[in-house]
Image (spheres, grey):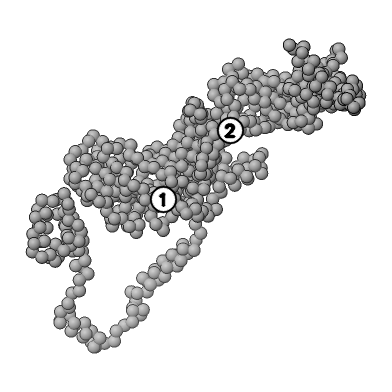
Amino acid sequence: MTHLNEDTLIRYAFDLMDGSDRKVAEHHLDGCGLCREALGQLQAKFAVMDVLADETPSEALIQQTLAVPHSGGRSIPLYRRRWFVWPAAAAAVVFACLLTLQNLPDSLPKSSPPTVTHTLPPSDVPLPGPEVGGPAWAQAPEAHVHTMAAQPDDGVRIVHPEDIPDKPPFAPASAIELVVLPRPEAMQLTIYNSADLTLVRDTRKLTLKPGWNWLQFMWDETLIDPTSLSLRPLEHADKVDIQQLVFPARLKDIGRWLIRSEVEGAVPFEITYFASGLSWRAFYMGTMNEDETTMDLKGYVHVANHSGQDFENAQTRLIVGQTRLTEEIPYLARRRYPYGPDILDDKSNRLDLGQWKEEEEMAPGLEPWWFVSNGDMKMDGVMGGMDGGAIFYHEIKAIEKEGLSEYFLYTIEGTENLPNTWAKRLESLDVSDIPVKSLYKYDEDRYGTDTIRFVSFTNDTEHELGTTPIPEGNVKLYRTVNDRQNLSYVGETDVKYIPVNEAVELNLGPAQRVKVEPMLMDRKTDHYTFDNKGNINGWDEIETWSVKLTNAGEIAVEAEVTRNFGVEEWDIAIPQGQPAAYEKLDVHRARFTAALPARSEEILTYTVTKYLNERAAVIAKERQGNSN
């Protein structure tokens, strides 16, 4: 059915049609309730304008008005009348108070959370302010259909599709008004640690009217990627159609969805988008026993929010794994226009994630002032009233762990409040009596002349682990020094992602109490070979080395010395009674292993024969023949 447009209805209402056109319009109005309703609304709209019509004053009123200045007696000025004094004084006081309030600075920080609105017709309803601390959804659609066909049990009513206009209404940006809706029913954050990437899923109920609805989403002063915005109804998907997403010209950080609805009532919607500025990292604290054979390991995750918006009662999920992005989310979030040109907005009034990481690296021993221990967090004016500081709840929350294709998913139990610029620490791992091995390595090719300390273990069931991968992070190690459980600091290092059943060595840096000092004692050459002209073309180089191994510690340790001979053909001779055995590590290197008692010193002596030039070829042929 083709409906009468607004121009035709106006000409009909003001009797501007000729006879034939008017009869056609009357015939259509007799059979179309929608057009009759639209005509009634137009007539009511123009009836209001009659209040502004000019009224012709009567001759008597004109004569009475002109006669007042010529009446006898002198008029008393307004400021001399006694009743005027007190109202004037009260007005002066009110004016002074207004000036004072206007000059007062704002006491609370301003934030601009993402906002969702619907286009509204003009209304006398007072307009509340936007919700603080999270995305504020507001809505009231443009619609003119009220013919209901059914009312399901969930309270919404269904209309006939043919009663909805074929074309959506025009909704200019100036027609947008805000009515704030209740808080979100559900919020979920999925944070990737390998990239500055967070998937946000926000569920709320929007009250729709039948017909066309405009939904506006604003994300000013936040780090949201507008190209990732998505909206879908969680119920009545066959009756609610998301037509398009429009980014209005000359308006920044605003997107508008056009929704065609065959239902009237509250419908749950889910909006999803990518955000930047949220991150998480893992760190661990290990405590070894006195003889450094076992370790108690506790793991934590540190979740930080620098996205520009607050998240309240959000389910938090953490993803372990490498993520490949062709475009960075911070770049997409700072573009002035969602789909180019590539002009970046200056959102420097917020501390971005990179700057926060730099400041944290400058002071690695200090926790940020916004650091909050495990549990719920409240902040006055943001997450509920309180009299300063943060409230600490020490109940440990469980973290559910599960594999997800090439990733691993950690789901934190319950929900979390995460205001902007705040962070939380949550426990993720607590394992006792993990078998560990302390090892001291000397390798001039890798570590120079320092002896490096390592602590190794394996992420498997034999070592009380092996149920899940261990995310990359920072590890701090301590050692129990007496029966009173006093601790001494051992060292710290960064650890990479540890899959199940894989061994890991924690590099704790140069050792202080274990030293390895090699010394060349003798060098000579022998077994020269000559070419046809009598020139030397090969020889053996024989070196004798003395390696001093010192353990000044209180417990026995194991030392590993790697020597690179620089040639492919070589032999080693070790005298009887040496404290170390050796193995051929590769074509150029040999590795010696020695057990050092507490507060001891050992001397390792060996002689290496290196075969050079033609002698190397001769020895290689001999060895090949022996192997055959």
- Residue in view at x 33 percent, y 82 percent: 77
From this view, report whether residue 444 is shown above or below residue 624: below
Q: Name the residue tied to disc 2.
A: 282
Report the front residue among 265 and 358.
Answer: 358
Q: Residue furthest front?
A: 532
Left or right of 588 on screen, residue 259 = left
Report the front residue among 594 and 412.
Answer: 594
The percent position of residue 391, horizontal first and vertical second, equals 52, 38
Q: Which mark is residue 218?
A: 1
- Residue in view at x 77 percent, y 21 percent: 590
Left or right of 19 on screen, residue 198 = right
**Number of labelled discs?**
2
Q: CA distance from mark 2 to mark 1?
A: 33 Å
Kind of residue at badge 1: Met
Q: Quadrant of residue 443?
A: top right
The percent position of residue 504, horizontal first and vertical second, equals 64, 25
Q: Secondary structure at mark 2?
A: strand
Q: Is residue 307 visible?
A: no
Left or right of 404 on screen, residue 541 = right
